[in-house]
Amino acid sequence: MTASVADPSLADLTRAELGELLDGEPSYRLDQVWDGLYRQRRPLAELTNVPKGLRQAVGELLPPALKLVRAQTADRGKTRKYLWSLRDGHLVETVLMGYRNRTTLCISSQAGCAMACSFCASGQVGFDRNLSVGEIVEQVLGTLQQPSTSHSGAINSGAARGGAMNIVFMGMGEPFANYDAVWAAVERFHGDMGIGARHITVSTVGVIPGIVRLAAASLPVNLAVSLHAANDRLRNRIAPINRTYPLRDLASALADYRRAKRRRISFEWAMIDGVNDRDHDAAELAAYARPLAAHVNLIPLNPTPGYGHAPSPSGRIEQFASELGSHGVNATVRVNRGTSIDAACGQLRADKLVTIQRGARARRGARAQRER
Ligand code: SAH
């Protein structure tokens, strides 16, 4: 019998739930399994200190939710994208970025996205469903268990050898539209895998109820808000959720959040040529960001098929950053990673495997033609 989406995977279970399942086993068994999975980050099948029969029984009862469909590499091996299929055939993606002394894992919280931001590939595809806790957690475990992650030079320097690992909810989906599962995953990363709250970032398009909940939450994770426009007229167009949660209300929720958490907020701003990259846009952004003492990350737009605008030229981005600076707001210009494999911000759109296969066939065809 094959497992359906409704059946839990091992990573869906809390420690207490696994404890109930292992009732009747010696009490150290739970520690062995839990530490093996989350501290040592090893697959169940490899936990050789646990009897094989038990591993098999647990594995059959709680099979993985994710199956690796494809792994791709860019930036000379420093960026990797993993495409996973879920039990119901939906696809999600995870991106791993290796830096000198840290690794950043960009994970998805939903299959597709309902926020419909005009320039974002996931938004263009639409919403399939929320991911479960297990589906979120397995993205991290599965990625760390890839042979290329643990053995390759660049990426090895980070996560696998115990260097700092950052987890960012900047893949597909709106994390605050799936708050409970996202938060249970955050607690697993923090409490069980030992990843510091400051190494975990939740990125939202500005879903206020989520910001309110995060302000009351126990762990001081980082909050990033995808702003892209600092007036309602433009933001309504770029990020339609702004009609529900307009800029004024967003600012007041963020001010409350800051008071409660005393944590720096960051704003994400995709630099779109002629749309939100002029000096007066910078002045408007600065006026919005300064009272909130927010830091701004400028991301050159990644062109997507459904959006007719171009990224701002790099000179414009520099000018925009210095304009912000002159208004007392700090900004960082982000370097795009993984554009060649569509792994850059907002390019994750694992909509249909057929599309991908068709794409691969077309590329093979084109190559064959060139070679002819
Ligand atoms: N829904 C969440 C998280 C996913 S998007 C959010 O909106 O924050 C992660 C980041 O990538 C967001 O800042 C988003 O605005 C940005 N992004 C999406 N599409 C992009 C594109 N085509 N170019 C540049 N950044 C993009």
Image: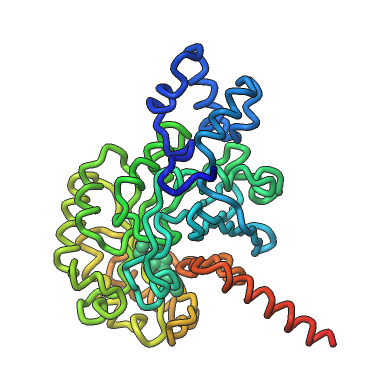
Q: Residue furthest front?
A: 1
Relative image position of residue 264 (x, y in whole percent): 30, 52
Relative image position of residue 237 (x, y in whole percent): 28, 80
Vertical order, 344 against 211 (above or below): below
Relative side of 139 to 116, left or right? right
Residue at position x 30%, y 50% in the image: 179
Quadrant position of the C terminus in the picture: bottom right
In this view of the protein, can residue 297 be seen by the observer? Answer: no
Residue at position x 26%, y 74% in the image: 240
Q: How is the image coloured?
A: rainbow
Vertical order, 136 against 118 (above or below): above
Relative image position of residue 68 (x, y in whole percent): 60, 53
Residue at position x 38%, y 87% in the image: 274
Return the residue nearer the eye: 327 or 67. 67
In this view of the protein, can residue 329 be seen by the observer? Answer: yes
Return the residue nearer the eye: 335 or 219. 219
Q: Residue furthest right?
A: 372
Residue at position x 20%, y 55% in the image: 209
Relative side of 68 to 192, left or right? right
Relative side of 44 to 248, left or right? right
Vertical order, 65 against 193 (above or below): below
